[in-house]
Image (spheres, helix red, strand yellow):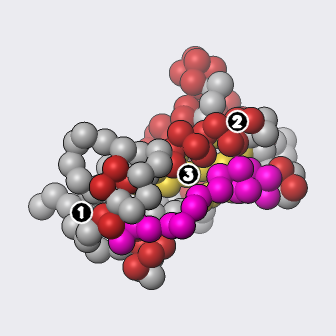
C-alpha cells in the first residue's frame, strides 16, 4: 500500500467506531470537490482528503461566550456577543501556517447557527452580532485560495 492510501482503520482510528460510509458525506462539502467526490469511489475520496494534509477547524459558537464546550440548548441568543469577527485574520493564520483548508462549525449540538435564519430563534439574527459569519468565513477563506468545509450537527438539542 502506498503512503498516500489510507485503510479504513487509519481513517477512523484503531477503534473503528464509524464506518467509512458514515464518514464519507463530509468530504463533498469542500469547495470544488462535489462533482469529483460524487463520481469517485470511497478510497479515492479518502485519498483526496488526506492529500489536503493540514487544515483548520474553527469551533466558534454560543459556547464560546458561555464557557461551555457543549453549550446548553435554548440559551438566549443574545449571549453570542463578539465585539467583532475577523474571518480574514483566521484565513491569514491558515495561510501563514501553510494550511490548505478550513472547516467551520456552522451549527453545533446546542442548535445555535452562525447564519441568520427565519427558521427558529437560535441564530445570529437574534444575537447581539447580526452578521452572517458563514458567508464571511467562506469569502475570507476563498479569497486566500483555501478550501472551505462545514461541520453542521444534525443533532439539535433544542428539540426533544
The tag on residue 157 is 1
Q: CA distance from mark 1 to mark 2?
A: 31 Å
Residue 64: x and y, percent?
48, 73
Q: Which residues are magenta?
A: 79-93
Q: CA distance from mark 2 to mark 3?
A: 13 Å
Disc 2 element: helix
Residue 2 visible in image: yes
| Residue wearing tag 3 | 104
| Residue wearing tag 2 | 142
Residue 68: x and y, percent?
41, 79
For residue 84, above or below residue 140? below
**Which is nearer the eye, 126 or 15?**
126
Disc 3 element: strand
Q: Is residue 87 magenta?
A: yes
Disc 1 element: loop
**Which is nearer the eye, 133 or 60?**
133
Q: CA distance from mark 3 to mark 1?
A: 19 Å
For residue 48, above or below residue 32? below
Amino acid at each position: 500500500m502506498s503512503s498516500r492510501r489510507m485503510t479504513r482503520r487509519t481513517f477512523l482510528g484503531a477503534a473503528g467506531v464509524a464506518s467509512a460510509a458514515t464518514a464519507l458525506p463530509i468530504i463533498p462539502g469542500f469547495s470544488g470537490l462535489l462533482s469529483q467526490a460524487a463520481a469517485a469511489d470511497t478510497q479515492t475520496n479518502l485519498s483526496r482528503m488526506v492529500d489536503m494534509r493540514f487544515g483548520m477547524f474553527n469551533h466558534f459558537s454560543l459556547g464560546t461566550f458561555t464557557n461551555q464546550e457543549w453549550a446548553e440548548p435554548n440559551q438566549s441568543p443574545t449571549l453570542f456577543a463578539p465585539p467583532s469577527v475577523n474571518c480574514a485574520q483566521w484565513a491569514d493564520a491558515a495561510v501563514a501556517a501553510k494550511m490548505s483548508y478550513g472547516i467551520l462549525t456552522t451549527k453545533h449540538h446546542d442548535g445555535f447557527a452562525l447564519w441568520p435564519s427565519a427558521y427558529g430563534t437560535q441564530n445570529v439574527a437574534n444575537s447581539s452580532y447580526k452578521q452572517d459569519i458563514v458567508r464571511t468565513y467562506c469569502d475570507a477563506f476563498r479569497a486566500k485560495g483555501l478550501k472551505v468545509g462545514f461541520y453542521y450537527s444534525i443533532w439539535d438539542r433544542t428539540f426533544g
